[in-house]
Image: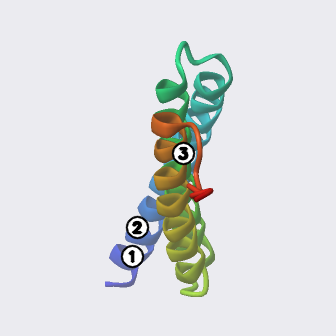
Amino acid sequence: MESALEITRMLIDIATQIAIVVVGISIFLLLYRVIKGPTNPDRAVALDVMGITLMALAGLVTIIVVTTRLNDVVLLIGILLFIGTIALAKFIEKGVIIERNMD
């Protein structure tokens, strides 16, 4: 029973480290798309996906560190990402984020 538990822990560590490498590579590729994107909506989508991958990275670090304290960070990133996506979509569509009536 002890050896099965050790093998499981080893497999989780290896899988988590591989996932961190893959997520890190995807963040760099998304950063390239944010900088070189052909249009502004492409940049917005890449920025949104980059935030989601940052959430995944925080979750993977939580697994490695074996703590639940980073779960709040994941939720905070998600909330800020949602608000930022809505603001960016409104800016791309209308050109302004906050509309002011000058009546």
- The residue nearer to you, when weighing 12 against 58, is 58
Residue 57 x/y as whole percent: 56, 57
Tell me the distance, in whole angstroms, between the alpha carbons under discs 1 and 3: 51 Å
Residue 74 x/y as whole percent: 53, 71
Residue 42 x/y as whole percent: 48, 25
> Do the numbered discs 1 and 2 sit on residues whose CB atoms are within 8 Å?
yes
> For the view shown, which residue lies furthest in the right direction?
35
- The residue nearer to you, when weighing 20 against 44, is 44
Q: Residues within 10 Å of mark 1 (few under 14, many from 20)?
A: few
Q: Which amino acid, mark 1?
A: Ser
In which quadrant of the rendered view does residue 38 lie?
Answer: top right
| Residue 62 position (above or below residue 72) | above
In which quadrant of the rendered view does residue 40 lie?
Answer: top right
Element at label 2: helix
Residue located at (38% from left, 78% from top) = 5
Specify which label sits upstream in the sequence, 2 or 3. 2
Q: Is residue 66 visible to the viewer in this orientation of the structure?
A: no
Specify which label sits upstream in the sequence, 1 or 3. 1
Of the residues tagged 1 and 2, which is closer to the observer? 2
Residue located at (58% from left, 59% from top) = 103
Q: Is 21 placed left or right of 82 in the picture?
A: right
| Residue 87 position (above or below residue 65) | above
Q: Which residue is mark 1?
A: 3
